[in-house]
Amino acid sequence: MKLLVALLVSTFLVHSLLATASSSPAPALAGSRRRGKEAAVAPLGYSNATVFDISVAKCAGCGALGAWAESLEFLYYHNLVRLARWELPLAWSPRLESYARWWAAQRRGDCALRHSFPEGQFALGENIFWGGAGGAWRPSDAVKDWAAEGVDYSYAANACATGRECGHYTQIVWRGTTSVGCARVACDDGGVFMTCNYYPPGNVVGERPY
């Protein structure tokens, strides 16, 4: 009951803020990325507690019991990034999570930074991350790394800065995307591989993310 009340209050707050905010309506599908620069992802006008409550509600029943905390961490940080752009929060998809876990399991042996789809044949949105051995890489590290690309995205040009990547960021904030599922695996070499899948996929050529 408390969870339902939190969801209703949070949803009302989100829609109230969206109604008063100015809204404006990408590049190719998100590619691979190593651990790199990091940026804070603080929402505009939202408290972290509000975003957390929304994410808990949208993560209900997600993941196996042992993986619930990781699932929620993935979702919470995605929603922080989205709400900073006045986009509605994503919901957790057990089906996307299952797919992400399948692909993460394939990468356990080599931690190779590879996508699950052949280049140009993406059926889902997909962001991937690799963290080297010796680091306690968490879901927040992956999402912050992808979100840090926001500084390299130009809304006016609807393009990344020359020589830079921004497709991971635009997939996270893509207006039409409604659900996400992710997985994290510790690789045999001591590194960490993380992957997130999105539906509907973003980064549609000729369209803007928000």
Image: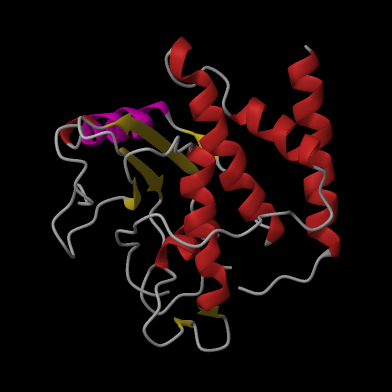
Residue 14 falls left or right of residue 150 = right
Q: Residue furthest front?
A: 134
Give the residue at x 36% y 75%.
205
Within the magenta stretch, is there residue 99?
yes
Question: Is residue 178 shown to the viewer in this render?
Answer: no
- Please name the residue shown 54% across and 42% down the image: 140
Q: Which residues are magenta?
A: 94-104
Residue 171 versus residue 25: which sits nearer the camera?
Answer: 171
Residue at 15 percent of width and 39 percent of height: 110
Q: Which of the 4 quarters of the picture holds residue 48?
A: top right
In x, y percent, where is residue 35?
A: 40, 54
Please provide percent x and percent y for residue 157.
51, 89
Q: 38 and 178: which one is in front?
A: 38
Let me know if residue 15 is in the magenta part.
Answer: no
Whether residue 126 is visible here, answered yes or no, is: yes
Q: Above or below — where is 135 with respect to 40?
A: above
Q: Nearer the viewer, residue 102 or 23?
A: 102
Point 31% across, 30% down: residue: 186
Q: Is residue 67 above or below residue 30?
A: above
Quarter location, residue 160: bottom left
